[in-house]
Image (tube, rainbow, N blue to C red):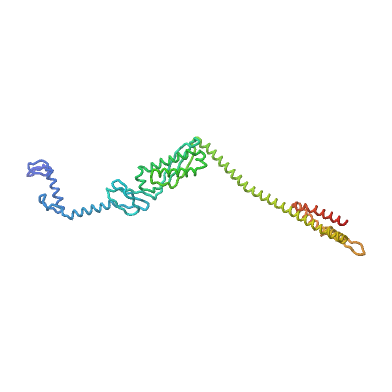
Amino acid sequence: MAWNEPGGNKPRDPWGNRGGDQGPPDLDEVLENLRKKFSGLFGGGSGGGGSSANKPPAFLYAIIAAVLGVLYLFWGAYTVEQQERSVVLSFGKYDRTSGPGLRWHWPPVEQMFKVNVGQTRSYRLSEEMLTEDTNIVGVSLEVQYQVIDPQSYLLRVAEPEAVLHHSTESALRQVVGASTMDDVLINNRREIAIQVGALLQEYLDKFNTGIDVVDFVLTDTKAPEAVREAFNDVAKAKEDEERFRKQAEAYANSVVPESRGRAQRLREEALAYKEQLVARAEGDADRFRDLLTEYRRAPAVTRERLYIETIENVLGNTSKVLVDVEGGNNMMYLPLDQIIKQHQARRDGEAAGASSAPESQPATPERSAYGSRTRELRQ
């Protein structure tokens, strides 16, 4: 039934009031009713306010305090991983650095910050700069670093990454500005990277950033776009020059030792041949002196012996056989098979003697000298 529907005993308003009071309910009355309802939930009676029967019991306060204490413990507890370190500030001032494990601090009096000291971070930079010989080169590099001092990394500098950026750029410009274009692009890239890395670490230590440079790599160095093709041609020509030089050095290293060894072998062979000739000449001289002594003692016997030895040497090289028959004519025997064999052997000997001329040359003068001495003795 609507509030103004006819047939009711008393008129009602939209707020449920009957009678002549047509206004809204009192706000204080509504709040009092709500207070009474909440007091009833905690064990209070429906009597008037201010009595001891409406106060909550003491154990309720203990429960609330225990819950708040547990929440505070959870609020102050934190875990530090194996690769992390925690820096704790007390009233904004550095207090301690904690290692891995379960840790706790006093919030909000203390503040905690975690820093990963085991992670290797990387930073890239690409810049164009002027070299010592007034050329512009483009340099791209990569810096790998770690945080070794969490306190300095968080508190000493406001923006460690910005300090790293400016320090890297400053060190790179200083080293590249003192180098030539060829050194930066081709010749001394590794040495330049080492110098820039050392100078960068010096800057970071000077600013107390707590950062340690693990590796510094020049990923790319290139000439300006306008002259890049010409510079690439020059670089290829230098590479070809270096390659040809190394090939020539390798060829020289293979030929020169061989030639020196051959020359040394020839010198040793000549020295041996000289010693052989000298020794043979001295031996012949000693034998001739001994023969002369024997000849002076018995000229007839010595002359006969020399004649027989000479005949044996002369006839021993011929293919004819002379048979002396007492009281008869001499008979000539001509063995054709032996003649052919000796002729072939003589040809082989001449071919071998032509290949070793130093060893075969002294035979003829020595034999002729020996024959002349034999003729002198026979006379």
Q: Is residue 288 left or right of residue 99?
A: right
Residue 334 appears in the rendering: no
Residue 39 appears in the rendering: yes
Residue 134 rendering spot, x and y as whole percentages: 49, 35
Residue 197 rendering spot, x and y as whole percentages: 45, 44
Q: Quadrant of the C terminus?
A: bottom right
Residue at screen point 92% across, 63% down: 328
Q: Quadrant of the N terminus?
A: top left
Q: Spot the residue most to the right.
A: 327
Residue at screen point 66% across, 49% down: 260
Q: Is residue 202 left or right of residue 76?
A: right
Residue 344 rendering spot, x and y as whole percentages: 79, 56
Q: Spot the residue most to the bottom.
A: 326
- Nearest the camera: 340 or 59? 59
Q: Is residue 306 left or right of residue 241?
A: right
Tell me the quarter of the picture where residue 157 sits. Answer: top left
- Nearest the camera: 102 or 150? 150
Residue at screen point 31% across, 52% down: 78
- Nearest the camera: 337 or 304? 304
Tell me the quarter of the picture where residue 378 sits. Answer: bottom right
- Nearest the camera: 143 or 63? 143
> In this rendering, is residue 74 above or below 170?
below
Residue 135 rendering spot, x and y as whole percentages: 49, 35
How many numbered marks does the figure carry? 0
Tell me the quarter of the picture where residue 173 sits. Answer: top left
Q: Is residue 204 left or right of residue 225?
A: left
